[in-house]
Amino acid sequence: MLEISTIREHKDRVVEGLKKRNVDTTLLELLDTIVTTDDLRKSTQTTLDNLLSQSNKMASEIGQLFKSGKTQEADTLKGKVTELKDDIKEYENKLRSIKESLDDMLLQIPNVPHSSVPAGKGAEDNEVYKNWGQPFPQLMDGALPHWELAEKYNIISFKDGVKLTGSGFPVYKGKGARLQRALINFFLDEASKAGFNEIQPPLMVNKDSARATGQLPDKEGQMYYVEKDDFYLIPTAEVPVTNLYRDVILQKSDFPIKLTGYTPCFRREAGSYGSDVKGLNRLHQFDKVEIVWMDLPDHSYDVLMEMLKHVEGLLEKLELPYRILRLCGGDTGFNSALTFDFETWSAAQERWLEVSSVSNFETFQANRMHLRFKDEDGKTRLAHTLNGSALALARIVATLLENHQTPSGIKIPKALVPYTGFDFIN
């Protein structure tokens, strides 16, 4: 969440940034309420501190009076301390209520977009940052979309998934299952070569974890909830991996922190319909390898570019044409200051499919999760956090099947053959 000091000292920049997101005016008005509520918090804290100081002073005086044999005076002072304790309790409750109210308001405010984020209302206003490869490869006559290829070669069953669970839960079979496993291992190995430390996290998290990385309350309706245990199934490995550093104070020498993790991901995807959800286009359960990077504020935008290059390298080794979009204000996620989306061209569907988002959250997540570090003069500061998909498998599989289909089968990219153990699906 935003730091109150940022809202106080840079209100014009905050308002300008939030307007890029096309937020409701009531949210902008909330900024002033946050400042006045914080003023109340400060004055209440000051009063409470004074009361505690008086109580401690009186307690010391009572001890001295008893030692001096002045029992009556000591008892009188004890009565005053009792009254003071009632006041202290009242102000402690008041302060707790003010802090809860302040947190509730701050949780409603999204991150301020970076100055490079273009204005816009939605996906149609995103800016093409880079193209790679032939974006519209010419396929053979009679080329099939991936869901028909999956059925033709018996590698993915959507019907079995519906039978076992429901729509959006495919079953991978034979070479399809081996392709999934190959991609996961390939992505993890590439991340390890790039210096990311592999983590195998839980697939469920508690509310504190979901709140710290910004899924709650913003994405609560998109998450699967295990009510009896009060756990959430993770929508991405970002949540548990980043939370490893919740409530941690680091030294500057600890950076950079580079982590990677493979997990299944679970998302309700409410409101999706039509061609957007056909085949592997939009699933409720899918596999993904995530990269998470934590670093010093001065380094984070250089880090963001390095993460982009890493994802580019993966797509180029898979021989998939792609483009990178700089998301506009209206399409940038709640937590992000700047997001780049990678899309691969789905040749048989003749459309772009998002396969990765790489984002810099600046201090937004770190403030929620209290991830801090000490600089040279001992001052405690918030770190910057970044994350990216490297990569999300479902749509990678979709575009890989479609773009690499031939009359005799589906050709496996050269870089992936050592992982699959075969170079063709036929």
Image (spheres, grey):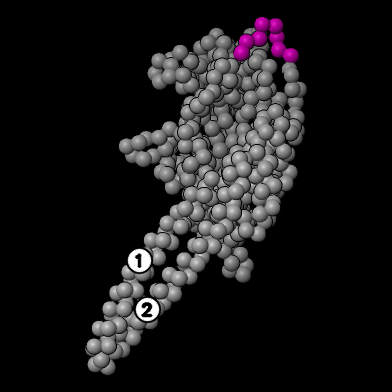
Task: Identify which residue is drawn at 45% across, 71% down.
Answer: 47
**Rendered view: 65 above or below 388:** below
Left or right, 288 with reference to 140: left
Left or right, 225 with reference to 246: left
Task: Identify which residue is drawn at 52% across, 58% down.
Answer: 37
Please provide percent x and percent y for residue 340.
67, 37
The residue wearing badge 1 is: 89
> Is residue 41 in view?
yes
- The range drawn in magenta is 138-145
Please provide percent x and percent y for residue 191.
59, 40
Please provide percent x and percent y for residue 299.
68, 53
Q: Secondary structure at mark 2?
A: helix
* Disc marking residue 350: none
Give the residue type at disc 1.
Lys
Compare residues 101 and 160 and report the one nearer the observer.
Answer: 101
Give the residue type at disc 2.
Asn
Task: Identify which residue is drawn at 47% across, 37% down.
Answer: 220
Task: Identify which residue is drawn at 65% across, 38% down.
Answer: 22
Given the current orientation, which residue lies at the most extreme top position? 142
Q: CA distance from mark 2 to mark 1?
A: 15 Å
Residue 141 falls inside the magenta stretch: yes
